[in-house]
Amino acid sequence: MSDGRSDVVVLRVRVLPADIAFVKFVFESYEGIAVVRTLDRKSADLELLVAPDFAEAARAILESLRPEVAWQPLGDPETR
């Protein structure tokens, strides 16, 4: 039975290429918050796959990175 929520919240961000590994490491250190995928290494587009219950925490982690990582949100992912 579905409660109307999606199984996954997708957050997409762009970072500097040099920051890809750092962002992935940070999210890996918060086990279970998000799976981070690199969509494009050259433009450093990342996709975070987040369980709906952890979406707020994932957004808070991203915001906490702002002093160290210049990231910008990307539009919603295309419907597949």
Image: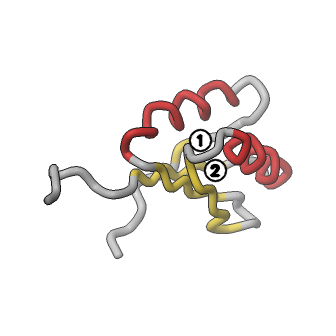
Q: Residue at x 74, y 23 (%)?
A: 67
Q: Are marks 2 and 1 in contact (CB under 8 Å)?
A: yes
- Residue 35, by quadrant, is bottom right
- In the rendered structure, which amino acid carries the disc numbered 2? Arg
Q: Which residue is mark 1?
A: 72
Q: How would you rate the neighbour count of disc 2 (Cα within 10 Å): few for under 14, some for 14-19, many for 20 or more?
A: many
Q: Earlier in the sequence, mark 2 or mark 1?
A: 2
Q: Residue 54 location in percent, x, y?
A: 45, 39
Q: Residue at x 38, y 39 (%)?
A: 53
Q: Is residue 16 above or below residue 71?
A: below
Q: Residue 2 location in percent, x, y?
A: 16, 57
Q: Residue at x 81, y 52 (%)?
A: 21
- Between 62 and 34, the residue placed more toward the observer is 34
Tell me the quarter of the image containing the C terminus. bottom left
Q: Residue at x 50, y 55 (%)?
A: 49
- Residue 79, by quadrant, is bottom left
Q: Is residue 31 left or right of residue 41?
A: left
Q: Is residue 42 above or below residue 7?
A: below
Q: Which residue is mark 2?
A: 14
Q: CA distance from mark 2 to mark 1?
A: 5 Å
Q: Is residue 1 left or right of residue 67?
A: left
Tell me the quarter of the image containing the N terminus. bottom left
Secondary structure beneath disc 2? strand
Q: Residue 7 location in percent, x, y?
A: 33, 57
Q: Is residue 38 left or right of residue 49?
A: right
- Picture colour scheme: secondary structure
Q: Looking at the rendered structure, which numbered label has been put on residue 22?
A: none
| Extreme residue in the bottom direction | 80
- In the rendered structure, which amino acid carries the disc numbered 1? Gln
Secondary structure beneath disc 1? strand
